[in-house]
């Protein structure tokens, strides 16, 4: 049905089709923005260690543990190994991932890395709000950050069990988690 208004133009229009991602794997969007980014890393086709790499898996494991003892996160360890040692994928050399190596040696972080950085971001936003009370945008962004923290914490409590079932995020004690 078409209804026409006083000017003769159609008032009812066909519904708009939803925008599709340009890449089939990038259908899941971000939580608090409209982005559906398609950038990702390109892993090597061969899953075995490169022939030119002369370092053994035992040496890589010792190096990973040494970097973890310095206080680096698993992703920072991976970047250092890639940039300074030429190890593109630790898994291709050792057969296990960095976080699993750290767990085996008792050096894994107590809370997952993505949750840690969200809590760190929330602590920084809360500190900013203490100094600038009238910053309404920061207050809104803090609310969004904390809702992401709660959602991620619920996932880690129920799914992979990386957090104890009684773990709860509290803004008052958050600064002790990231210090």
Image: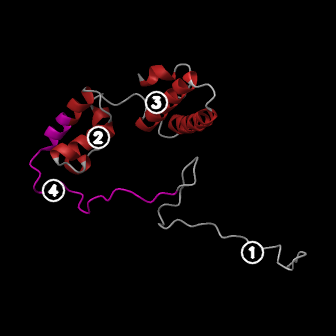
Distance from the alpha carbon under mark 4 to that under mark 3: 37 Å
Q: Residue at x 47, y 57 (%)?
A: 37
**Considering only vertical position in the picture, is 131 above or below 63?**
above
Q: Say which mark, if any, is on residue 14.
A: 1
Do labels 1 and 4 touch, CB within 8 Å?
Answer: no
Q: Main secondary structure of the magenta part?
A: loop
Q: Which of marks 1 and 3 is nearer the N terminus?
A: 1
Distance from the alpha carbon under mark 2 to that under mark 4: 18 Å
Mark 2 highlights which residue? 98
Q: Say which mark, if any, is on residue 50.
A: 4
Instruction: State the image coordinates of residue 20 (x, y, percent, origin top left).
Output: 56, 67
Residue range in magenta is 36-63
Mark 3 highlights which residue? 120
Q: Which of marks 4 and 3 is nearer the N terminus?
A: 4
| Residue 55: quadrant of the picture | top left
Distance from the alpha carbon under mark 3 to that under mark 2: 22 Å
Question: Can the viewer see residue 26 in this picture?
Answer: yes
Do labels 3 and 2 touch, CB within 8 Å?
Answer: no
Q: Which of marks 1 and 2 is nearer the N terminus?
A: 1
């Amino acid at each position: 049905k078409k209804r026409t208004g006083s000017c003769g133009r159609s008032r009812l229009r066909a519904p708009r089709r939803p925008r599709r991602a340009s890449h089939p794997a990038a259908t899941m969007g971000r939580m608090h923005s409209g982005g559906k980014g398609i950038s990702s890393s390109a892993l090597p086709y061969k899953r075995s260690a490169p022939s030119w790499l002369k370092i053994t898996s035992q040496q890589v494991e010792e190096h990973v543990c040494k970097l973890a003892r310095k206080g680096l996160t698993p992703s920072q360890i991976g970047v250092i190994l890639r940039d300074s040692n030429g190890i593109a994928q630790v898994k291709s050399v050792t057969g296990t991932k960095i976080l699993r190596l750290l767990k085996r040696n008792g050096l894994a972080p107590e809370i997952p890395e993505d949750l840690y950085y969200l809590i760190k971001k929330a602590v920084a936003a809360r500190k900013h709000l203490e100094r600038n009370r009238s910053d309404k945008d920061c207050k809104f962004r803090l609310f969004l950050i904390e809702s992401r923290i709660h959602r991620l914490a619920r996932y880690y409590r129920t799914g992979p069990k990386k957090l104890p079932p009684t773990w709860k995020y509290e803004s008052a004690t958050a600064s002790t988690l990231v210090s």
